[in-house]
Amino acid sequence: MDFNLTENQIAFQEVARSFAQKELAVHASEWDAKKIFPKETIRKAAESGFCGVYVKEDVGGLNLSRLDAAIIFEELAAGCPSTTAYITIHNMVTWMIDEFGSPELREKFCPELTSGQKLGSYCLTEPGSGSDAASLKTTAIKNNNHYLLNGTKAFVSGAGETDILIVMTKTAEKEISSFVVPSTLKGISFGENEKKLGWNTQPTKAIYFDNVEVPQEYLLGDKGMGFKIALKGLDGGRINIGTCSVGAAQSAINHTQKYMHEREQFGKSLAQFQALQFMIADMLTQVIASRQMVRLAASKLDSKDAQATTYCAMAKRLATDMCFNVCNQAIQIFGGYGCTQEYPVERLMRDARVHQIVEGTNEIMRVIISKKLLEEGATLQIR
């Protein structure tokens, strides 16, 4: 068991860290305040392969592991968690087409997605189905050589700005199927951009489908495979969101450590107060624990471990809760300045708070974990 990164992983980590510092961190506060979706910067990220990290090479991806991806996304998230979270969603969309699409779908859509020429969104949640994802009501009814899509999707990241949608629909009673849907098809419209606590560098809107004609060859995988595809996507998505939280928290620690040496009260720097020393020690411990849990789950997913789903749920729950607390504690150490936009810690906290809800709430993560744990023999399988 080797916890050290390989030379290749260190190289990717350094490239991602440099990109985050030069292209993300310097603009993140402005993007957040003005609600700018930095499409050109995302396309720059694609030049380093960050829009197709675990997509196969023949369609422009890097074909890296989920562990490699976690290392890369953590570094990017330290620059801007919100923008990086969108990049991870784009990666999931691209991977779904690569993994489950026909050769024709892969060739048609993946190269433009991995290159950043086109951007993707994932459409699962609906106004009436959040945690209960299987209760979705959007339908796709076969009509000659097309499917007619009708329904509404909610809280879609990138909606209105992206080109390719992965849409989960009902194709029959108790049958969910997945489609690749170009966002320019007739009958698609968008709601207003949600006014959100965090994730302000990516638009979040409802998408309405009104008799949208989708070619039958745009079916992703087999008919009825949609929920299986969604669940497989969520395993990876939970690792991605967990690692975005780790990146946010690491950034908060970086800023806090610097501030504690600069800020003086009662004639000495904050770094000399034992109470604050204890706080930042706990913060670092929580970030390290979260990082290792996320990387363990990523390794389980890479090795196709039978318990990978449970590990992904545990990693998402632990990392997003702990890392939000770290960002929140950073604000406490900064004091009043931490509540201003002069420093990035309040933005990091707001973005990290979103992570406790998306990709399945942390309460749903506990449902997944406990359901597995209470099976006979589970304590020997998950350790």
Image (tube, grey):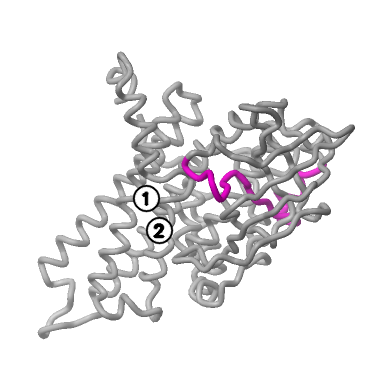
Q: Is residue 308 left or right of residue 120?
A: left
Between 116 and 36, the one nearer to me in the picture: 36
Per the image, label 1 sits on a secondary structure element best described as helix
Give the CA distance from mark 1 to mark 2.
Answer: 7 Å
Three-letter code, disc 1: Thr
Q: Residues within 10 Å of mark 1 (few under 14, many from 20)?
A: many
Image: 185 above or below 272: above
- Whether pointer 1 and pointer 2 mark residues with C-beta atoms closer than 8 Å, the reply is yes
Residue assigned mark 2: 352
Highlighted range, magenta: 108-131
Image: 32 above or below 112: below
Quadrant in which the N terminus is drawn: top left
Image: 317 above or below 369: below
Residue visible at 16% across and 67% down in the picture:
276
Residue visible at 75% across and 43% down in the picture:
149
Quadrant in which the C terminus is drawn: top left
Q: Quadrant of residue 277?
A: bottom left
Residue visible at 29% across and 59% down in the picture:
326
Q: Quadrant of residue 150?
A: top right
Give residue 112's position: percent from left, percent from top.
77, 50
Three-letter code, disc 2: Ala
Q: Earlier in the sequence, mark 1 or mark 2?
A: 1
Q: Is residue 68 left or right of residue 114?
A: left
Residue assigned mark 1: 320
Give residue 239's position: percent from left, percent from top.
46, 42
Residue visible at 40% across and 79% down in the picture:
341
